Amino acid sequence: MAEQHYPEPACGALIFNPENKIFLMKSHKWKGKYVIPGGHIEWGETMKDAIKREAKEETDLDIEDPQLILFQEFIFDDAFYKKKHFIFFDFVCKTRSAKVTLNEEGQEYVWVSIPEALQLPIDPYTRKTIEEYLKLKKK
């Protein structure tokens, strides 16, 4: 793999199902912590198209109405399994389904309420996304 010379843009999806529970998956890339699905924005792809594609690839869920929550800088944090520099664009979105098929990036998943999610071992970037969503919801 080529050495990284620039930050990599990536997006994440805080997905709500019809029961108002959020999707989290355990990932070996995040040292077994629970995370939201997401990944790189491909060349020529909008962020909204990227998050729809990534959610489909990692969970087989179709998502709707992605709305930007926040962006986060990730610079060589040990939370990830490789030394990387990312810029995360995290979205809140909905799905009409709760039927999940994980790809190789996820080892298991849960649908949980936000209070339940905050009690799980989640990575710090997922925690910040959830906390920011809660702040925006109060406005």
Image (spheres, rainbow, N blue to C red):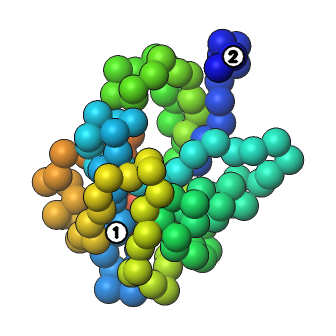
Q: Kindly identify the residue that appears in the image at 40 percent across and 21 percent down.
A: 77
Quarter holding the C terminus? Answer: bottom left
In this picture, is 85 found above or below 51?
A: above
Residue nearest the observer in this picture, 23 or 68: 23
Q: Is residue 61 visible?
A: yes
Q: Nearer the viewer, residue 55 or 93?
A: 55
Secondary structure at numbered mark 2 = loop
Residue 58 vertical position relative to residue 121 in the rendered view, above or below: below
State the separation of the CA atoms marked 2 and 1.
35 Å
* Residue 31: percent from left, percent from top: 29, 34
The residue shown at (77%, 54%) is 46
Is residue 47 found left or right of 44 in the rendered image? Answer: left
- Callout 2: 10 Å neighbours few (<14), some, many (20+)? few
Where residue 8 appears, x then y in whole percent?
65, 30
Residue 128: image location, x then y, percent: 36, 44
| Mark 2 lies on residue | 2
Instruction: Judge left or right: residue 95 versus residue 77.
Output: right
Amino acid type of the residue tagged 1 in the rendering: Ile
Residue nearer the viewer, 2 or 135: 2
- Give the labeled residue for mark 1: 22
Q: Considering only vertical position in the picture, is 25 above or below 1?
A: below
Task: Tell whether label 1 touches label 2 (CB within 8 Å).
Answer: no
Left or right: 93 in relation to 116: right
Picture quarter with the N terminus = top right
- 2 vs 1, front mark: 2
Give the number of callouts: 2
- 127 left or right, relative to 36: left
